[in-house]
Image (cartoon, helix red, strand yellow):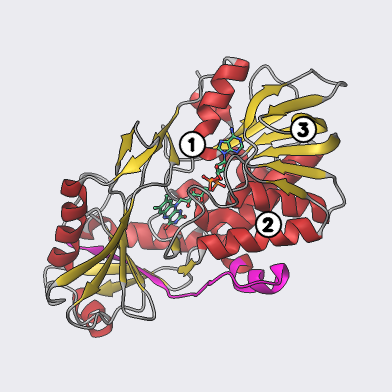
């Protein structure tokens, strides 16, 4: 079996890159260890599409993604759950080290706006007019009206279905166990548990997120500066109705809040589970669940009692040493590209970033929009 491109992993990135390549007429095979959206791109709730307080080097890309999200469902022919809610980042302290607080708000507002993420400053009073349950300790906020949320599981399934309609083959429950780079001019190949050898005449993309590190090390001796984390999501029902139409983040607390149409709160924003070797997955840490709820209560003190509806820490995500993704040809190979190190915020960029990765694979040239993701930046 020979395809132009073979992709390891059918998460959001594997499926979306397959879609772009197949739509441009390339032959593509995606191999997935579990099922589509088995890891970070799957599960309940929604993911934030956030430009507010993002690494400034990613703002041109999020600005591009802002333009693509609203019409993505129409393009893919299936719902994505995207809603442009606007996003507020709450400021409680005068200064937060050298990276935040009221003293930094105007500089951040102006720079974000210049780089494609329109941002307003709200005083504490203006914020409480819009978010009446916010604590009086909040002194101000940065508001990015183009931020929003999207359904990760639905969107990933929509990309997979659209990729298949365009001719891509996606095989589930068939883990890739070895990857071969045969040098320029020859074919590259992967070996899977069930399909045997699958060859790629142009390139292989490792879009397996958390396992990219071990695949790169075991097959090519490449040590990527990445690691695996198990982000925590907690669902709560408040006693009192929470009037919160926005995606909410915080300048100095570990807090990210979304409220769905039924009034259920989804809490995330930096808390983690712990790896459990018995299940080979992430398991909740009670202190971290309680810690994230404490941050919510401190920020919105009038929600009343909070009933826990669920906690998920099972979905592996890759972190990178500078919190930016790594998208590059693995050193020493001719045609094995890796896309990993999303650092808990890879989702928001998906429609823009996946098109650039497909372009990188198809042309062999790095699009300037993803210059900041080269491995070179992390080497002396
Ligand atoms: C709880 C949580 C909350 C998050 N919140 C946000 C947010 O609000 N905003 C945001 O922008 N981002 C967020 N993220 C991050 C975002 O979801 C991820 O960056 C993104 O989904 C990564 O997509 P991916 O396709 O690279 O990885 P994944 O979805 O992890 O896909 C990788 C796939 O590869 C498969 N695989 C692994 N090894 C192999 C192998 N050997 N052979 C074949 N297949 C293999 C896996 O089974 C998996 O399906 C969050 C992540 C989590 C977990």
Contact between labelled residues 3 and 1, with CB atoms less than 8 Å apart: no
Where is residue 214? Give x, y as percent: 52, 25
Q: Is residue 300 above or below residue 65?
A: below
Q: Nearer the viewer, residue 45 or 56?
A: 45
Q: CA distance from mark 1 to mark 2?
A: 20 Å
State which quarter of the image contains the N terminus. top right
**279 sits left or right of 92 in the view:** right
What secondary structure is marked by label 2?
A: helix
Q: Which residues are magenta?
A: 69-93
Q: Give the residue number, with chain letter if any, for mark 2.
A: 160
Lower sequence index among marks 1 and 2: 2
Q: Give the residue number, with chain letter if any, for mark 1.
A: 210
Q: How many marks?
A: 3
Disc 1: residue Cβ within 8 A of ligand 1's nearest atom:
yes
Q: Is residue 82 magenta?
A: yes
**For mark 2, does the 10 Å Cα neighbourhood hold few (<14), some (14 to 19), or many (20 or more) residues?**
many
Q: CA distance from mark 2 to mark 3?
A: 20 Å
Q: Is residue 242 above or below residue 220?
A: below
Lower sequence index among marks 2 and 3: 2
Lower sequence index among marks 1 and 3: 3
Disc 2: residue Cβ within 8 A of ligand 1's nearest atom:
no
**96 sits left or right of 75 in the view:** left
Q: CA distance from mark 1 to mark 3?
A: 20 Å
Residue pictured at 36% horizontal, 79% vertical: 245
Q: Give the residue number, with chain letter if any, for mark 3.
A: 203
């Amino acid at each position: 079996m020979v395809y132009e491109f073979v992709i390891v992993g059918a998460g959001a990135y594997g499926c979306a890159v397959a879609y772009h390549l197949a739509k441009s007429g390339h032959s593509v095979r995606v191999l997935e260890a579990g099922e589509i959206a088995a890891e970070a791109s799957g599960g309940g709730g929604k993911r934030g599409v956030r430009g507010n307080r993002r690494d400034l080097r990613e703002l041109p890309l999020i600005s591009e993604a802002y333009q693509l999200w609203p019409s993505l469902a129409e393009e893919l022919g299936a719902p994505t759950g995207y809603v442009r809610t606007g996003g507020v980042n709450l400021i409680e302290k005068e200064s937060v080290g050298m990276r935040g607080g009221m003293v930094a708000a105007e500089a951040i507002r102006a720079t974000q706006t210049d780089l494609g993420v329109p941002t307003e400053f709200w005083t504490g009073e203006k914020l409480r007019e819009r978010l009446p349950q916010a604590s009086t300790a909040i002194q101000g906020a940065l508001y990015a009206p183009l931020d929003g949320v999207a359904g990760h599981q639905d969107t990933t399934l929509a990309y997979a279905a659209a990729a298949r309609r365009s001719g891509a083959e996606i095989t589930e429950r068939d883990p890739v166990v070895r990857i071969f780079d045969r040098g320029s001019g020859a074919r590259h190949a992967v070996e899977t548990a069930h399909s045997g050898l699958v060859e790629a005449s142009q390139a292989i993309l490792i879009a397996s997120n958390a396992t990219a590190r071990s695949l790169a090390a075991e097959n090519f001796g490449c040590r990527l500066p990445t690691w695996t984390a198990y982000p925590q999501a907690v669902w709560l029902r408040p006693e009192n109705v929470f009037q919160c139409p926005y995606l909410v983040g915080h300048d100095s607390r570990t807090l990210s809040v979304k409220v769905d149409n039924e009034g259920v709160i989804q809490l995330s924003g930096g808390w983690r589970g712990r790896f459990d070797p018995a299940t080979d997955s992430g398991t909740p840490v009670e202190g971290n669940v309680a810690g994230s709820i404490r941050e919510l209560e401190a920020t919105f003190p009038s929600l009343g009692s909070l009933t826990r509806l669920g906690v998920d820490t099972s979905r592996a995500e890759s972190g990178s040493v500078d919190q930016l993704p790594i998208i590059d040809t693995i050193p020493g190979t001719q045609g094995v590209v890796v896309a990993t190190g999303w650092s808990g915020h890879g989702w928001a960029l998906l429609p823009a970033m996946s098109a650039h990765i497909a372009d990188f694979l198809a042309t062999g040239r790095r699009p300037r929009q993803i210059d900041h993701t080269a491995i070179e930046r992390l080497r002396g």
